[in-house]
Image (cartoon, rainbow, N blue to C red):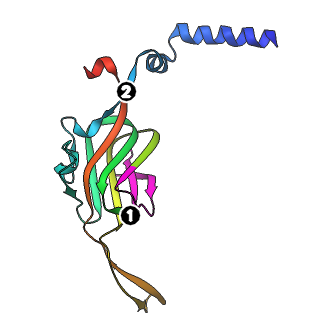
């Protein structure tokens, strides 16, 4: 047992001294804090009011979609949606390459005006949100669809809004100053 412990300590010392894990080591040594990338220069959104840093302004989705584009790829650890009427939605990250997207989080039956989501380091330069339900949806009587052979609910999507969309990642305290 003692032999294995000494081998592990020697291996750890070699890794630390060689700098193989310099990025991880830097994150452990440097003080880190969450930073809202959405308010940085060069970020674009479907509605600029969603990322202006003012919780009092309200931005509306473009139909069922909200797009947020960052100027460069960032490691995203948290997304917060403040002041919203969104009940159901799917959040996607843009994959490296041409126009491929991957679902990273689903919002279901949300009743709160604030939605907070945590991720383990999603690295991307764009986020998009597909809204499938809001508190302002208008429901009509269900109708029979002869093509599907079933009864289909009739829902007219209300206009989705967000007061503030925040996208957070870790940055070193020295770099932020």
Q: Residue at x 72, y 10 (%)?
A: 7
**Could you classify mark 1 by the number of other residues whose Cα lies within 10 Å: few (under 14), some (14-19), or many (20 or more)?**
many
**Could you classify mark 2 by the number of other residues whose Cα lies within 10 Å: few (under 14), some (14-19), or many (20 or more)?**
few
Q: Is residue 162 above or below residue 43?
A: below
User: Which quadrant holds residue 162?
Assistant: bottom left
Q: Residue at x 19, y 44 (%)?
A: 54
| Residue 161 percent location from the top left of the image | 25, 59
| Residue 103 percent location from the top left of the image | 44, 53
Cα separation, mark 2 vs mark 1, equals 30 Å
Residue 113 circle label: none
Q: Residue at x 28, y 47 (%)?
A: 165
Q: Is residue 124 above or below residue 137?
A: above
| Residue 129 percent location from the top left of the image | 34, 56
Q: Are marks 2 and 1 in contact (CB under 8 Å)?
A: no
Q: Which residue bears the numbered disc 1?
A: 87
Residue 97 visible:
no
User: Which quadrant holds residue 168?
Assistant: top left
Indicate yes or no whether the magenta region holds residue 7. no
Element marked by disc 2:
strand
Closer-to-camera residue (159/101): 159
Please identify the quadrant where the N terminus is shown: top right
Indicate yes or no whether the magenta region holds residue 114. yes
What stretch of residues is rendered in magenta? 87-115
User: Which quadrant holds residue 134?
Assistant: bottom left
Q: Which residue bears the numbered disc 2?
A: 33
Residue 67 in the figure: left or right of residue 17: left
Q: Determine the residue located farthest toward the right in the rendered image.
A: 1
Please identify the quadrant where the C terminus is shown: top left
Residue 85 in the figure: left or right of residue 1: left
Q: Is residue 21 above or below residue 6?
A: below
Residue 87 visible:
yes
């Amino acid at each position: 047992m003692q032999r294995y412990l000494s081998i592990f300590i020697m291996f750890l010392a070699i890794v630390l001294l060689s700098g193989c894990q310099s990025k991880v080591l830097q994150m452990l040594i440097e003080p880190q804090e969450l930073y809202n990338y959405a308010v940085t220069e060069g970020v674009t959104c479907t509605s600029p009011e969603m990322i202006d840093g003012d919780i009092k302004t309200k931005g509306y989705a473009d139909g069922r979609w909200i797009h947020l584009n960052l100027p460069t790829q960032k490691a995203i650890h948290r997304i917060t949606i403040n002041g919203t009427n969104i009940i159901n939605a799917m959040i996607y990250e843009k994959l490296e390459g041409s126009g491929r997207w991957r679902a990273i989080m689903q919002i279901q039956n949300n009743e709160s005006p604030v939605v907070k989501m945590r991720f383990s380091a999603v690295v991307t330069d764009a986020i998009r949100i597909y809204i499938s339900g809001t508190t302002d949806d208008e429901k009509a009587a269900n109708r029979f669809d002869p093509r599907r052979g079933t009864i289909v609910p009739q829902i007219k999507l209300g206009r989705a809004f967000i007061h503030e969309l925040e996208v957070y990642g870790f940055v070193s305290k020295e770099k932020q100053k």
